[in-house]
Amino acid sequence: MKKVLLAALVSLLTITASAQLVVLNDDGRDSAYVESIVKRSQKIVDGLQLDDQKTARNVRNIIANRYFLLNDIHSKYDKSQQAERDAELYRHHFELASTLALYLNEEQIDAVKDGMTFGRLKRDYQATQDMIPSLSDFEKQQILIWLKEAREYAMDAADSKGKHFWFDKYRGRTNNWLSSRGYDLKKERDDWMKRIEDAKKQ
């Protein structure tokens, strides 16, 4: 009975959410800036291939509003106020996923996160596995966990440089960890490059 009621509640919330309009928070913002953010957000939404246009528009506006919010927060503080900035970023961090959950499933929310961070998680994860084919399932899982952490931090970064910084930082952590487990990363990398070159010759 409880499962039935829960399913009904989720269905009701989904219907209610889809009936609402997410307003674009573009008041007082430069029109060229708004246009660029909307285009960036729309590109992410296009990758989701949503059937319902109203849902797609709402998701686009949620993503765009997130970019606006991040810009507002980063613009508010100077370098000497990093702690205050980070505290405000943290207060708002979980809002994006929770709002998107009204319209998207978990896999689609991950796709939005990947879209906002240049797809680094998937690329870095695949590259590490390609470089070291002998990784154990445990090692792969740990690497993925760290990449997901990096993505969460990257999502709140001020610009592309800041987003890439977090993935590079966690790649360093991963490399140190793999080295401590006995992997010779230079040899693994050299062997990987050789495999790539050999594949090109075929």
Image: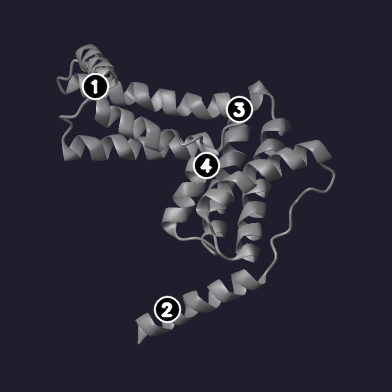
Residue 68 visible from this viewpoint: no
Alpha carbons under labels 4 and 2: distance apart: 31 Å
Figure quadrant of the C terminus? top left
Horizontal and vertical percent for residue 104? Answer: 50, 60
Q: Which residue lies furthest to the front in this view?
A: 202
Classed neighbour count for the residue bearing mark 4: other residues with Cα under 10 Å, few (<14), some (14–19), many (≥20): some
**The residue under label 1 is which amino acid type?**
Gln
Alpha carbons under labels 4 and 3: distance apart: 26 Å
Classed neighbour count for the residue bearing mark 1: other residues with Cα under 10 Å, few (<14), some (14–19), many (≥20): few
Residue for badge 2: 6
Q: In which quarter of the image is residue 22?
A: bottom right
Residue for badge 4: 115
Residue for badge 3: 82
**Residue displayed at 39% across by 33% down:** 123
Classed neighbour count for the residue bearing mark 3: other residues with Cα under 10 Å, few (<14), some (14–19), many (≥20): few
Q: Which of 147 and 77 is in front in this view?
A: 147
Alpha carbons under labels 2 and 1: distance apart: 56 Å
Residue 80 visible from this viewpoint: yes
Q: In which quarter of the image is residue 171?
A: top left
Q: Nearer the viewer, residue 1 or 29?
A: 29
**Residue displayed at 29% across by 34% down:** 143
Residue for badge 1: 202
Q: Residue furthest right?
A: 28
Alpha carbons under labels 3 and 1: distance apart: 52 Å
Q: Is residue 40 above or below residue 123?
A: below
